[in-house]
């Protein structure tokens, strides 16, 4: 498969001269197209920092992040905004839907920002909402639907512009186990049927077991990598738990 | 400990509610400056109407106090809601409700006291500005000097403290009722809870617009009567509230229609924000619109009166001195001597007004008023019993004295000299011929220069005939008109009056000459039935009297405007802090900094614009109507849009300042581009 994202020697420091925290310490890896990658690690291991760097939400201290031939570490604010708009999708733990807009409007808004025609927006919104089974609550406001529906709406919004990659930050964090399972199945569907590349940050081994590949982070560095290959999810989950027990991570199985 | 905490919290609030505090400071200084007019010796020195000024300011203060109580109450409730979680934490820590309430009370008092004390400083300067303005209006020199009266300070402080007290009482009750759970979630109670998606109330929007159109039609077509106008105005205020009740539904309807504009850029975001805001704020928005209306009306009327007073002197008193005497044979020698004693007469005429035992013109005017102008001011005291005539030679001499061109008449012609606002009446009458001693006279023209026609040269109108025609008539009364060089004695009017009224007291019944045959015209602004007019004195006294209305009107207008703008600004700013995540989400969706600024600008613009535009449309119509009514009864020259235009410019300027301040603060609050995305 073709390489989509290349991270080269990325470092991110916080704090002033005297008191530096190395949130990310010289990380290098690649992500291929149509991959469903998970990043795991204990609290404070740098997962979210890494995701923010890849998602152009934060800037690196040093190193490069290549999307194909484009190095996002060299972009200015406006270029990054345009890049986000056209290439990236987001799913957050707390949904981040706009509470004044209906589900349908939340999804169309992301597309109308790219200045598409009214008809195309309507068609594509309907299509994706049907695929993710939320078309029936299209005119409801976020506070009127369940957490799972909200999160699927967030997925639909992340996918509407056909992004190169979807970033998910603890997407199951606020969901009950049943909704979490449904969402993870949605992710798998997005990955396998819609050919979406997904990069998910989680500290939950069960969620991680849905990925094809997992990077383990500790103290800002990658210390292990697992690839699912042809194993079943259950076997993969046990392997993940083994790794976590070795590192004293805070993962757990449901 | 509590006081320390209160002080620290107050400091923090000072930053958070900067706009509110600036407004309180501004209101304090306005209040101080205007209240000082009541106690000022400088004002009492120049104005005989200082007492009336005090009364009018008192009246204005009443309305201002009401509005300040509303503002303080609104703001306190607002702050309490925003900080409810913090208060709940205090309660969880073991504070008593009373302690928390007194903590909040202390903070509020600290904030109030600070803004009051700061407000006094600009207040002292503003007082000088207003005093200078009043002196300028009555053409007197004023040398700046500070006048700090304890009375002013006490009154201002009392009003301020009283407003705070009244606003706080109601708040205390709320505190007592609240429980910790409620307080924890109070700041989360916001519009999305009753967001709704119903567009059913759209009819209210259209009904309100229809009523407003109906109101304007009634006004433009002049269908208002003394009987229906109050109901119409009440209806108008109700329709303003209706407008906002329906507006949210209207916006939702528009969003749901999915028209092209809705799905363009972030429009849907702006529209939804607006719709939900309008929905939760409908009552406040209605009140703000009414406040803007009152503010605009106040200042427009103040400007209208100001325009009136600057042009009145030339229209009403073209002669420096005019004296009336009911005796047609009176020779005015005593008056002449009195005037000469102190001033130099440059030209002078003693003359008579004649009557022919007819009252054709008077009857015509009364009919004109009731039929054409639909007004009842043309009553018994408006006109002389008989029509008033003047000899052409006297007329021309007077015209020359006043600086107008001379006119000429053929043997069988007459002319009409009438107030300019009644030109139409003169023109209508000019088709009628007069019969004097059996001869017929045709009208040669209508003249409308200012000619002292409030009981001297006739009342409203005067018929000018060739000298020989007047010879056959009966002298009616006599007049003295004089132009003098330089200034006259300030008590000249009283001295001239004393020549005849000596011994008569204002309490005597015949002082008011109820049975005398004299008319005073149909003016409604600044009318007097005096026998003597001295231009300089009359002008001064009129101007100082009108200032007593003009200044309080401006006062009310300014305060109302600032209060309304503060509420608007504070609303938006608190939202900007509360809903920061919405904008940060837009940024994550890939909106550039500039585009987000544009979204904010659009949102603020619509939010600010709606109440203002509504107020402009409504009050504009009312001013138009009022100035036309005013023009019917008082001579004034400026077109009505000019008062209103200047008001809008003035208030629009203040509006803009608040708008810009809000925008800047809004952007700062959101700060999405300051790496605050995480």
Image (spheres, coloured by chain):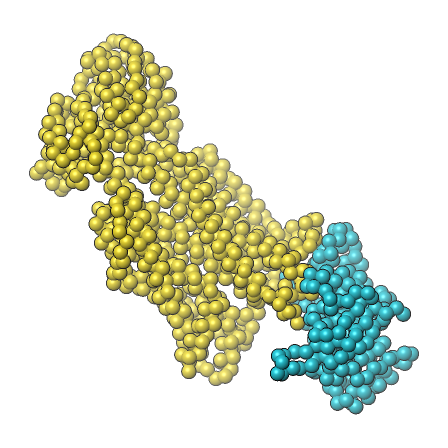
Identify the residue at horizontal 47%, vertical 66% (top origin).
B17
Q: Is residue B57 left or right of residue A112?
A: left
- Closest to the observer: B556 or B114? B114
Identify the residue at horizontal 28%, vertical 9% (top origin).
B411
Q: Position of residue B586 (x, y in %)?
A: 67, 62
Q: In the figure, residue A128 lies in which quadrant?
A: bottom right
Q: Position of residue A253 (x, y in %)?
A: 78, 84
- Residue B145 visible here: yes
Quarter of the figure that contains the C terminus of chain B: bottom right
Q: In the figure, residue A102 lies in which quadrant?
A: bottom right
Q: Is residue B208 above or below residue B357?
A: below
- Closest to the observer: B228 or A5? A5
Q: Which chain's colour is cyan?
A: A
Q: Is residue B651 above or below residue B508?
A: below
Q: In the figure, residue B145 lies in which quadrant?
A: bottom left
Colour that chain B carries in the picture: yellow
- Closest to the observer: A75 or B556? A75
Q: Is residue B670 left or right of residue A176?
A: left
């Amino acid at each position: 498969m073709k390489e989509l994202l290349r991270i080269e020697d990325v470092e991110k420091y916080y704090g002033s001269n005297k008191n530096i925290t190395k949130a990310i310490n010289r990380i290098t890896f690649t992500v291929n197209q149509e991959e469903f990658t998970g990043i795991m690690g204990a609290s404070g291991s740098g997962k979210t920092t890494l995701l923010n760097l890849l998602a152009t939400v934060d800037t690196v201290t040093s190193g490069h992040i290549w999307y194909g031939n484009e190095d996002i570490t060299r972009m200015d604010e406006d270029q990054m905004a345009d890049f986000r708009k056209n290439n990236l999708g987001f799913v957050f733990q707390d949904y981040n839907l706009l509470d004044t807009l209906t589900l349908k409007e939340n999804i169309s808004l992301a597309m109308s920002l790219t200045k598409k025609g009214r008809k195309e927006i309507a068609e594509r919104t309907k299509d994706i909402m049907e695929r993710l089974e939320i078309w029936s609550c299209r005119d409801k406001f976020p506070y009127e639907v369940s957490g799972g529906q909200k999160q699927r709406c967030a997925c639909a919004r992340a996918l509407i512009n056909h992004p190169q990659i979807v970033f998910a930050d603890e997407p199951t964090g606020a969901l009950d186990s049943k909704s979490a399972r449904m969402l993870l199945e949605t992710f798998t569907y997005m990955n396998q049927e819609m050919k979406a590349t997904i990069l998910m940050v989680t500290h939950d081994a069960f969620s991680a077991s849905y990925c094809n590949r997992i990077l383990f982070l500790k103290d800002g560095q990658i210390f292990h990598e697992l690839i699912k290959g042809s194993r079943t999810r259950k076997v993969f989950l046990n392997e993940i738990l083994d790794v976590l027990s070795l590192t004293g991570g805070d993962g757990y199985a449901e | 400990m509590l006081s320390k905490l209160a002080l620290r919290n107050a400091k923090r609030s000072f930053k958070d509610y900067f706009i509110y505090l600036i407004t309180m400071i501004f209101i304090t200084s306005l209040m101080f400056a205007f209240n000082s007019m009541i106690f000022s010796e400088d004002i009492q020195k120049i104005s005989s109407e200082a007492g009336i000024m005090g009364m009018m300011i008192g009246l204005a203060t009443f309305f201002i106090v009401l509005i300040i109580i509303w503002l303080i109450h609104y703001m306190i409730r607002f702050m309490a809601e925003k900080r409810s979680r913090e208060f709940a934490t205090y309660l969880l820590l073991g504070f008593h409700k009373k302690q928390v309430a007194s903590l909040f009370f202390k903070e509020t008092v600290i904030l109030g006291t600070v803004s009051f004390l700061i407000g006094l400083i600009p207040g002292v300067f503003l007082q000088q500005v207003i005093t200078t303005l009043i002196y300028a209006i009555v053409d007197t020199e004023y040398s700046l000097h500070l006048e700090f009266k304890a009375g002013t300070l006490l009154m201002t402080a009392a009003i301020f403290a009283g407003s705070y007290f009244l606003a706080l009482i109601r708040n205390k009750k709320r505190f007592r009722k609240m429980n910790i759970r409620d307080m924890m979630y109070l700041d989360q109670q916001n519009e999305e809870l009753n967001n709704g998606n119903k567009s059913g109330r759209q009819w209210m929007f259209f009904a309100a617009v229809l009523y407003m159109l109906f109101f304007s039609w009634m006004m433009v077509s002049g269908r208002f009567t003394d009987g229906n106008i109050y109901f119409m105005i009440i209806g108008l205020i109700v329709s303003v509230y209706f407008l906002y009740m329906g507006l949210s539904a209207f916006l939702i309807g528009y969003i749901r229609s999915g028209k092209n504009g809705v799905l363009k850029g972030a429009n849907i975001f702006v529209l939804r924000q607006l719709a939900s805001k309008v929905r939760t704020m409908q009552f406040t928005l209605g009140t703000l619109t009414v406040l803007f209306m009152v503010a605009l009306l106040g200042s427009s009327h103040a400007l209208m009166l100001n325009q009136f007073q600057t042009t009145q002197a030339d229209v009403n008193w073209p002669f420096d001195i005019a004296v009336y005497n009911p005796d047609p044979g009176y020779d005015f020698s005593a008056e002449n001597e009195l005037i000469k004693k102190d001033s130099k007469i440059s030209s002078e005429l003693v003359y008579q007004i004649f009557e022919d035992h007819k009252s054709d013109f008077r009857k015509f005017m009364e009919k004109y008023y009731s039929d054409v102008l639909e007004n009842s001011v043309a009553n018994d005291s408006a006109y002389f019993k008989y029509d008033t005539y003047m000899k052409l030679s006297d007329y021309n001499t007077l015209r020359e004295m006043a600086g107008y061109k001379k006119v000429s008449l053929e043997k069988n012609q007459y002319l009409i000299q009438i107030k300019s606002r009644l030109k139409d009446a003169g023109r209508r009458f000019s088709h009628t011929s007069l019969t004097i001693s059996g001869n017929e006279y045709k009208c040669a023209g209508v003249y409308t220069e200012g000619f002292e026609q409030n009981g001297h040269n006739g009342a409203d109108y005067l018929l000018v005939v060739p000298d020989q025609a007047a010879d056959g008539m009966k002298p009616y009364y006599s007049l003295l008109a004089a132009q003098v060089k330089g200034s006259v004695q300030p008590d000249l009017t009283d001295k001239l009056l004393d020549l005849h009224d000596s011994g008569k007291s204002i309490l005597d019944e015949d002082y008011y000459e109820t049975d005398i045959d004299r008319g005073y015209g149909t003016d409604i602004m600044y009318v007097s039935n005096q026998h003597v007019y001295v231009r300089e004195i009359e002008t001064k006294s009129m101007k100082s009297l009108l200032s007593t209305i003009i200044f309080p009107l401006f006062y009310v207008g300014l305060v109302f405007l600032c209060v309304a703008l503060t509420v608007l600004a504070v609303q938006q700013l608190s939202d900007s802090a509360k809903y920061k995540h919405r904008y940060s989400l837009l940024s994550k969706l890939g909106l550039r900094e500039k585009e987000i600024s544009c979204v904010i600008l659009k949102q603020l613009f619509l939010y600010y614009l709606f109440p203002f535009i509504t107020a402009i449309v409504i009050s504009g119509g009312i001013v138009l109507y009022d100035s036309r009514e005013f023009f019917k009864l008082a001579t004034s020259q400026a077109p009505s849009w000019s008062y209103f235009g200047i008001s809008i410019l003035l208030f629009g300027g203040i509006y803009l300042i608040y708008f810009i301040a809000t925008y800047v603060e809004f952007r700062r609050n959101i700060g999405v581009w300051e790496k605050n995305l995480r």
